[in-house]
Amino acid sequence: MLRSVIGALVGREIDRRDGRGGFKGAVLGTLAARAATRMGPLGMLLGGAYVAKKAHDRRRGSRI
């Protein structure tokens, strides 16, 4: 379940950057989530840190 959440968040971020959305974000999100879970606790830590940093940057940007 956690892999699905990470994949969805990464895929959404890729789609936001791309601006077109669709298949590319879904595939890359799935691959990133699978790689993170295969790396074990270190991969989960890195994935969580990435998502937390993006959320922090987005929140900080909306305040200014």
Image (cartoon, rainbow, N blue to C red):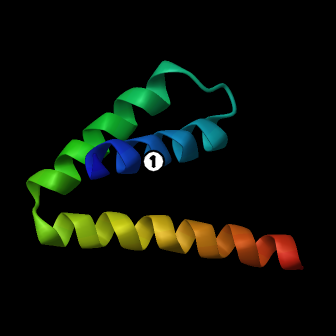
**Amino acid type, residue under disc 1 in the picture:** Val
The single residue placed furthest to the front in the displayed view is 1
Q: Position of residue 28 (x, y in %)?
A: 37, 35
Q: Position of residue 13 (x, y in %)?
A: 56, 47
In the displayed structure image, the side of residue 30 where residue 64 appears, left or right:
right
In the displayed structure image, the side of residue 39 where residue 9 appears, left or right:
right
Quarter that holds the N terminus: top left
Examine the image and state in which quarter residue 21 appears.
top right
6 and 13: which is toward the camera: 6
In the displayed structure image, the side of residue 11 where residue 18 appears, left or right:
right
Q: How many marks?
A: 1
The single residue placed furthest to the top in the displayed view is 23
Quarter that holds the C terminus: bottom right
In this view, 64 is above or below 6: below
Examine the image and state in which quarter residue 26 appears.
top left
Q: Residues within 10 Å of mark 1 (few under 14, many from 20)?
A: many
Residue shown at 69% from the left, 33% from the top:
19
The single residue placed furthest to the right in the displayed view is 64
Disc 1 secondary structure class: helix
Residue shown at 39% from the left, 73% from the top:
49
Q: Position of residue 4 (x, y in %)?
A: 33, 42
Q: Which residue is mark 1?
A: 10
Residue shown at 66% from the left, 73% from the top:
57
Residue shown at 48% from the left, 48% from the top:
9
Examine the image and state in which quarter residue 17 appears.
top right
In the displayed structure image, the side of residue 7 where residue 33 appears, left or right:
left
